[in-house]
Amino acid sequence: MAASDTTMAAADRASTRERAADYLLRRHRFRAAEALPWLFAIAVFFVFPDRMTFGSQVLVMVMFALSLDLILGYAGIVTLGHAAFFGVGAYTVGLLAARLQWTEPISGLFAAAIVAAIVGFITGWFLLRYRGLTLLMLTLATAIMLQETGNLRSDISGGYDGLPGLTFKPLLGIFDYDLYGHTYYLYALAVLAVVFYFVRRIVYSPFGQALTGIRENVRRMHAIGSPVHWRLVTVYTIAAAIAGVAGALFTQTNAYVTLTVFDFDNSAKVMVMLILGGTGRLYGAFVGATVYMVLEDYFSKLSPTFWQFGIGLVLVLAVLFARRGVLGLFESMGQYIAERKKS
Amino acid sequence: MPHFAIIAVSILFDGLAYAMFLFITSVGLSVTMGLMGFVNLAHGAFAMAGGYVVVTLTRNLGVGFVPSLAIAAVVVGAVSIVFERGLYRRLYKSTDLEQVLLTIGLAFMAIATATYFYGPIPKSVPLPEWLQGDVNLGFRYFPSYRAFLIVLGAVLITVLWYGFERTNIGAKIRAAVDNRRMAESVGINVDRLFTLTFAVGSGLAALGGGLAIQLLGLSPSFAVLYLVLFLIVVAVGGLGSLKGTLLAALVLGVFDTAGKYLLADAGGFFVYAVTVAVLLIKPAGFYGRE
Amino acid sequence: MRIIGWLGLAALAFTVGGTAQAETVKVGVVLPFSGANADLGHQIDKAFDLYVKLHAKDIAPNTVEIIKRDEGPPTGAVAKTVATELITNDKVQILTGFVFSPSAIALAPVVTQAKVPMVIANAGTAWITNLSPYIARLSFSMWHHGYPMGAYAFKSIGCKTAALAYTDFPPGKDSTEAFKTGFEKAGGKVTESIPMGSPVQVPDFTPFFQKIKDAKPDCMYVFIPSGAHAAGVMKTYGELGMRKAGVKLIGPMDLIPDNKLQDMGDAAIGTVVMGNYAVDLNNAENKAFNAEWHKAYGKDSYPDFMSAAGWDTMHAIFDAIKKLNGKVDDGAKVIDAMKGWTANGPRGKVTIDAATRDIVQDENAMEVIRKPDGKLGVKVLGTTKAVKDECKELKVGRCGS
């Protein structure tokens, strides 16, 4: 009796483990729908060839929002200083090009990632003990203090007039910068795809599951012996590196960078984009950044003076009718239709 | 008086005036965000609305400056009830992120609306004679308007302290904030109480906005321009504590002034350095609940 | 990719090159219509609109189509994106506006590559015109006011010593450096140089001014962006009783923008600025300009130095269109048409220096007074004719390259 109980329990455990493994695998597997944003991005390239300068800026913001999703959506770290890493990455390639004539773009991305990761690791180690408003203010102050440091040493940073006329070597030694921004759009898209694959791997790894655990219930994670602080610092460092890459792309696509990359506006805007798209769902960054920037572009052409009214209205309506972001709205609609079908 | 003493006293007075300015402009946020726990990034928008009410009253209707301030506080407080009932209330139980989205959206709409009605050129406000001169302190002159801010700040603190700590309604608000369910179960109408608290917070924001015109000028972007500063004051003071907001304003005001006076090259750093220092040592701010 | 690029260019050639007589010239206007500096953008935009409305007949049968875009915040990036797309997507042939220097700096390589002229109506960092042969500037460089003010302050205002106080961003640094260069050359001594925080900080200048007051220099040269900060300077200066203490307030004309002067009160009286424009400048073009302005925008609306530059900017563009009879596809020709261009505008006689493509204009020392009608105004104390950008003449720093 007792023996069969144990076997039963063991079998139960085994099947639970199997089901868990199966569940994770299923989540991990690429779904057909996931191809949509990428096909969309490629289609845009052919449909709007004259709008690729704007397109590259959207891709940069998507990557920036994606890095924020990793810490905000998955690990539950709310920050208002994410622009610090974007700025550090932006200035890394800027300074390398302007002061050391290191103008190869792809190695520049790696350099930016490394420097931003170092800054992310150091600040994260200090700051991630805090939560809530305290963390918001500490991260915000970090970004602004970096900006002030840059302004104190305008001889190096170029101050608010920035580092002008940066030129980068042709990509892979072949593709050069063009007025229409075609090269840099495809370049940004390729970099985004690589970064996205990496983020996706992280999110669906056991490490990613642990992060979600921390977001949902820190105490329980502490109780089961999970090294919470180190996990948070690790993901914060990774997110910083990705934000750094986004910043580096920003400098490369603009061939210019000023201290305004550290602005509070930049941190706040990327957060608004992400929430608008939906946090903790990978593609929220795509949808949020794209919707926000396209609307901003559309409204500001409609009325260069009053366009903020339109953006504001969209945000308010999103909160009222699409609580979990645009993607959340789609999800709810999907569920609703599924239930209608069932009944 | 020896030179360094004059400098010290100057810093103290100017710092105190700046501190009171910080307190007056942030105290409304301390009420809506600190007490009610709502991430109210539209605080600056209510302040801006108050400022424009003051401008309209003084410039177009010939009302005096001080009565205009009172009217602006009441009008904006009353109008804010519509927003509280219509929008804010739906999000009391939502996450911070949704509150951020809503209030940023409102702030954007406020900017465009103000531009539509008042245009983008900064407005100023006519002050009565008695607020334009200076007060003689013996060793230097001190602007009357700043003296007025100090006095008004003191009055405001007393009134708020009395209101929240010594009146029945203040006790109810504190009870509702501490434990909403318990407060409801002893028969407190929390809904109505929150509406009232929100109106008070918005009215205070409007008062701050009206008083800030003289120092900052008033343009539509006021709604977001100084938001970071107000957030810092509230965070350093600690959520839910008016006493903390006052102390934070004093510390930040005096340190900032001293920094600008003594070390102008690094002047921009001081506010943030003090903020980081305080929050690293006391994460919940001076008087915040851990 | 290349192919698409060529297709785009072919399309461009097809749309703008095909017609014969009356041309429609597409002009892209990039100004900050929203945000903290929206009032600056609107001051220029109003002048643009006014000029186009009153002078459309000058370029008949050709016409202009104005496409307006928001310059956004002074990051460079937003302006670069919208302006690049004005070229690639909207096919504009001339770009103008640009309040912020970073916008012009970011865009310089783009206009060089696209061969589209960029006619700057404000951005004042001195070396911008060196960045591309397709840039012309109708406003000023920070050196236009700062440098002559140095000598004038020493010789005519009686400043033997001066303290500098400036907003800690490039225009502030440029303006004070220009003043310092001129002032020291004349024999003056700078006692102190105080950065007063970034343009987005709370404009509370009390501690800085108090410090200067304690140091008792003869004069205080202040640069601040001409928005809400200008009013803040006057208030603090008045509140601290600095004039009574013997510290004169001097600076570039950004201290007393015409559309904010009336709000500044008695504290402003006695301030001496160096600048290229004031509504009180006594010339026929300015009187006509002011009359038209009030007719269009009401009696309480005033043009300021930005509007005056905006007016001359559109004037130069129109004259280039007229000269080329609407055939402005070749950006190099447009810029060539502007080189050496000269006209009488609200600021007096202005010329585009053929060598630098920067403006040459008269600089006036102006004192704020209470006019007989009770309003505040300025009295011209002296005029220096045909002032060039001394930064480029003296080859200071980046201006030399």
Image (cartoon, helix red, strand yellow):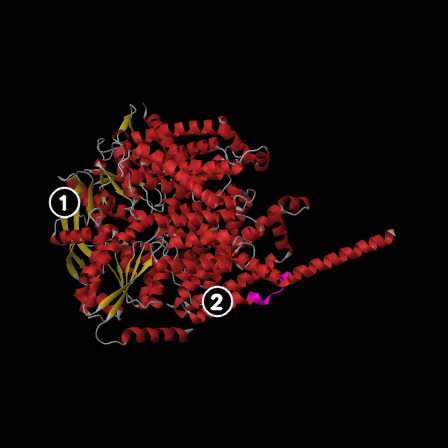
* Front position among marks 1 and 2: 2
Drawn side of residue B190 relative to residue C183, left or right: right
- Residue C48 lies in what quarter of the image? bottom left
Is residue C58 shown above or below C280? below
Q: Position of residue B146 (x, y in %)?
A: 33, 31
| Tag 1 residue | C380
Q: Position of residue B206 (x, y in %)?
A: 38, 38
* Alpha carbons under labels 1 and 2: distance apart: 60 Å
State the mark number for residue C263: none
| Tag 2 residue | A41
Of helix, strand and loop, which one carries label 2?
Answer: helix
- Residue B80 lies in what quarter of the image? top left
Range of magenta residues: A27-34
Is residue C226 shown above or below B138? below
Quarter that holds the N terminus of chain B: top left
Drawn side of residue A48 relative to residue A241, left or right: left
Quarter that holds the C terminus of chain B: top right
Mark 2 is on which residue type? Answer: Ala
Q: Position of residue A255 (x, y in %)?
A: 39, 61
